[in-house]
Image (cartoon, rainbow, N blue to C red):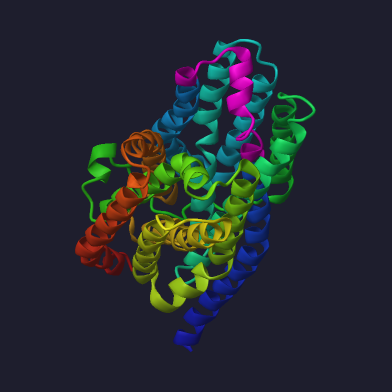
Amino acid sequence: MLVLKHLFPLSLIRGVRMMETKKALPILFLVMFLVMVGFGIIIPVLPFYAKEIGASPTELGLLMSVYSLMQLIFAPIWGQVSDRIGRKPVMMLGIAGLALSFFIQAISTQLWMLFVARIIGGILSSANMPTAMAYVADITTEENRGKGMGIVGAATGLGFVFGPAIGGIFSKISLNMPFYLASGSSFITLILVFILLKESKQKGSETVQKRPPFWKALNGATSILFFVQFLISLSLSGLEATFAYFAAKKAGLDSIQLGIIFMIMGFGSALVQGGLVGRLTKKYGENSVIQGGMIVSAIGFGLILLVHSFTTAAIFLTIFGLGNGVIRPSVSSLLTKTSSAGHGHSTGLLSSFDSLGRIIGPTLGGWLYSITIGLPYISGAVITIAAFVLFLLFRPQVNLVKLSNR
C-alpha cells in the first residue's frame, strides 16, 4: 500500500506534465516560427537598405556583426534572468525588442539609426532562443527532451525558409516595407505569447544556487558541448557566407535557383528536426545522434566540392543540412540533462558560443574562399571532424555527469 501511495501521485504528476507538454509545444512552435519569419523577412533586404542610406561594404559588415556580438554578450545574461523570474516575461521582452528594432530600422534615415536598431535588437532578441530551449527543458521529461528541442529547431528552420521569401516579395513595394512587416509580425507574436503561452518555470522546480562565473562554467565536464557547438556554428556560417559565390562559379546558378536550393535544404532540415530527432535520441541517445550528425555534415562538406549543376547542389547541400540539423537540438537536449546550472543559464551560454561561431565564420570563410574557392568546404569538413574527435574523447565525462545528476 505504501508503494502504491507513492507511485500514484508520481504517475499522476507525469500524466499532467505530458498533457501540458502536448499543449505547450505546438504553441511554442508557432511562436518561434513567427519570431524567425520576422527575423528572416529582413535578411535579403538589409544590405540594399543599408546601401541606400549610405553604408559602405565595411560598414555593412559591421552592421551585421554588431548584432551577433550583442547576442554573444547578452544571451547568457537573459538565460540566467529567466531562471530567476521565469521564461515567459523574458521571452516577451525579447520579442518586444525585435518589434522595436525592426520599427527603428524601418524609419531610419541615417546610418547611426540602423546601428542603434541593430544593437537594441541584438541585446533584447538574444533572450529568445535560450529562453525557448529552457522552456522546452522545463516542460519535457528527459526521454522526450530531444523531441522538444527538435521542434524548436524545426520552427527556426521553417521561419528562415519563409521569411526571406516574404521579405523579397514586399521589398518590391519599398525597401523599408519588409521592416514594417517584420515589426508588425513581432508585435502580433508578442500578443500571442501573452495570451497563449503559460509560464513553464514553477517555483522550486530547480534547485536555487549561485550561478558560476563564465570562466568557471567552462571548466566543467559539460564544457565540451559549448566548444562543439562553436565549431559546428563556425563551419556552417562559413558555408552560408560563400556558397552563393561557389555555386554561381561552379554551376552557373542565379539568385532564384539558390533561393530554391536553400528552401529545399531548410525544409529537409526542419522535417528531420521536427520528426526524427526525438525518435533518434530516444532510441540511440543524444551522444550517438550528435556523432552521426557530424559524420553526415562532414560528408556533405566533401560532396559540395563536387557540385556542377542545380540538381547536385540541391542534393549535396540538403545532405549537409540533414546532418547539421540534428546537432543543435541534440546538444541542447544533452546539455539541459547534464548541466548542474539552471536551464536558462546553460542554454544562454550555448547560444553565446553559437553566436561566436557566427561572428568568426563568415570572415574566415570569405578569406579562405579568396585563397581557393573550395577551401571553406575543405576546412568545414576538417573542423567538423575535429569537433567529432573532441566530442568522442570527452564523451565519457559527459556520461558520468549525466549519471551523477540522476
Nearest the eye: 335 or 283: 283
Q: Is residue 308 left or right of residue 162?
A: left
Residue drawn at x 50%, y 86% is: 4
- Residue pictured at 64% horizontal, 59% vertical: 24
In front here: 297 or 310? 310
Residue 282, can we see it?
Answer: yes
Residue 208 visible in this rendered orientation of the protein: no
Viewer-proximal residue among 378 and 200: 378
Q: Which residues are magenta?
A: 37-59
Quadrant of the image containing the C terminus:
bottom left
Q: Position of residue 99 (x, y in %)?
A: 66, 30
Left or right, 244 with reference to 390? right
> Is residue 287 highlighted in magenta?
no
Q: In the picture shown, does residue 110 fall above or below 14?
A: above
Q: Where residue 350 sits in the image (x, y, percent)?
A: 39, 46
Which image quadrant for residue 281? Answer: bottom left
Vertical side of 65 occupied by 18: above or below: below
Where residue 226 appears, as percent x and y from the top left, is 32, 49
Q: Residue at x 42, y 58 (%)?
A: 306
Asked if residue 127 is positioned above or below residue 63 in the image, the reply reads below
Count every numbered label the image shows and give the total.
0
241 or 38: nearer the viewer: 241
Is residue 364 toward the left or the right of residue 123 in the image? left
| Residue 53 sits inside the magenta stretch | yes
Left or right position of 20 against 128: right
The residue depicted at 52 percent of the width and 61 percent of the height is 312
Outermost bottom residue: 1
Residue 405 picture location, percent across and down: 31, 64
Question: On the image, which quarter does residue 332 sit in?
Answer: bottom left
Q: Main secondary structure of the magenta part?
A: helix
